[in-house]
Amino acid sequence: MFLSYCPSQLATMKDQLTAGNYDGLRGTAHALKPQITYMGIKAGEDLIKAIESSAGTKTNVEKLPEMLGNFSEICTKAMEELKADIA
């Protein structure tokens, strides 16, 4: 489920950030947060919370591209590891 859900959510988050849709970004981050926690992606937990908070309050939005880039890298690595484990 994570492997099918995460890539589309990451793409949505990037699109929302590009469009300046911070409310949408906050909502998508909020929806993805339980998946990150469930999968045990510790490095991503604080980042997704920070993205959700920053987008929700519209503060430090200049840091969102870097935060989302780092979060995307963490998720990509986790998906690669999961694919290797189930192969």
Image: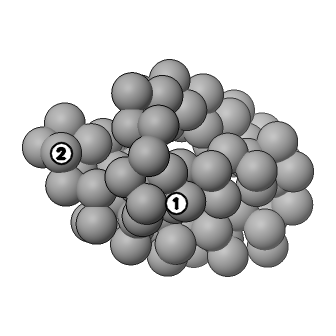
Q: Cα distance, mark 1 to mark 2?
A: 14 Å
Q: On the rendered structure, is 83 left or right of 27?
A: right
- The residue labelled by disc 2 is 20
SS under mark 2: loop
Q: Vertically, is 60 above or below 37?
A: above
Label 1 crowding class (10 Å Cα cut-off): few <14, some 14-19, many 20+?
many
Residue found 52% across the figure and 72% down from its top: 30
Residue toward you, 17 or 72: 17
**Residue kind at label 1, given as amino acid type:** Glu
Measured along the vertical axis of the image, is residue 73 above or below residue 47? above
Can you tell which quarter of the image residue 2 is in?
bottom right
Q: Which label's residue is closer to the chain start, 1 or 2?
A: 2
Instruction: Specify whether 44 is left or right of 5.
Output: right
| Amino acid marked by disc 2 | Gly
Question: In x, y percent, where is residue 45?
Answer: 76, 55
For this rendering, which residue is in front, 34 or 83?
34
- Dot 2: few (<14), some (14–19), or many (≥20) neighbours within 10 Å? few
**Do the residues bearing badges 1 and 2 touch, measured as CB atoms within 8 Å?**
no
Q: Is residue 48 visible to the viewer in this orientation of the structure?
A: no
* Residue at 39% from the left image edge and 37% from the top image edge: 61
The x, y position of residue 1, in whole percent, is: 57, 73
Q: Residue at x 42, y 64 (%)?
A: 56
Q: Quick one: SS at disc 1?
A: helix
- Residue 70's x, y, as percent? 60, 28
| Disc number for residue 66 | none
The colouring scheme, among rainbow, by chain, secondary structure or one colour, is one colour
Question: Is residue 37 shown above or below 12?
Answer: below
Residue positioned most to the left: 19
Q: Which residue in the structure is indicated by mark 1? A: 52
On the image, the x and y values in percent for residue 68 come to 49, 36
Is residue 1 visible in the rendered image? The answer is yes
What residue is at 87 percent from the left and 51 percent from the top? Answer: 42
